Amino acid sequence: MKIMMTKNRQIHHPSFKSRTREILLHSKFVFPLALPFLHYAISTTTTTTAKALNLALISGSTRTTGPPTVLGPRVSSFILHSLQIRGHTVTHIDPKNHDFPLLEKPHFAYPPGRTPENLQRVHEILNNADGYVCVTPEYNHSPSPALINILNHFGSSVFSFKPSAIGE
């Protein structure tokens, strides 16, 4: 996936297929992100009228307490509301609310009609999403085990050719 930013801060992102967008970024970064995609989604000023996106927000934190505070739910809530205010449809996938066992058998290994309901429901959310945002704490210089467990339940075809962003 190739992302270009011109000198006048316009982003050309080929994953938008025939509806390639040129976006003027007038606002500063709210939090560090991996791709300009999220800035497109939460930007307040665009040069074209953009179609609302269907996004999946995947939380990677399962902590309920911690030293000093647990920030994952607050960051997820901020991103969720920022995207919804701008007219995007956002579905939140939280490992605390979905029953994800440790990976023994991924979604694609089940025969049709025999996939557990919770895996099928999350697969449909991810498959129908235009893009996804992962919010994860950093555990020893890597994403959280809860996030990796969710992502590993699904094949790469679910995530292929979709813009993504990671907020830590």
Image (tube, rainbow, N blue to C red):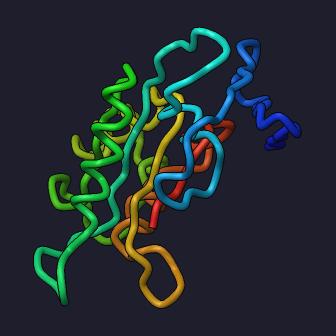
Residue at figure coordinates x 64%, y 35% from the top left: 25
Q: Is residue 50 above or below residue 165?
A: above
Q: Is residue 136 above or below residue 139?
A: above
Looking at the rendered image, the quarter that the N terminus falls into is: top right
- Which residue, as the protein is rendered here, is positioned at the far top? 49
Q: Quadrant of residue 113?
A: top left
Residue at figure coordinates x 88%, y 39% from the top left: 7
Where's residue 4, x and y in %? Answer: 84, 40
Q: Quadrant of residue 81?
A: top left
Q: Is residue 153 above or below residue 147?
A: above
Q: Quadrant of residue 37?
A: top right
- Which residue, as the protein is rendered here, is positioned at the far left? 65
Front residue of 91 and 22? 22
Left or right side of 128 for 58: left
Where's residue 47, x and y in %? Answer: 67, 16
Disc count in the image?
Answer: 0
Left or right side of 7 for 60: left
Residue at figure coordinates x 19%, y 89% from the top left: 67
Front residue of 36 and 30? 30
Where's residue 97, x and y in %? Answer: 15, 53
Residue at figure coordinates x 48%, y 47% from the top left: 108
Looking at the rendered image, the quarter that the C terminus falls into is: bottom left
Is residue 151 at all visible to an observer of this figure? yes
Left or right side of 51 for 121: left
Is residue 104 at all visible to an observer of this figure? no
Where's residue 59, x and y in %? Answer: 32, 57
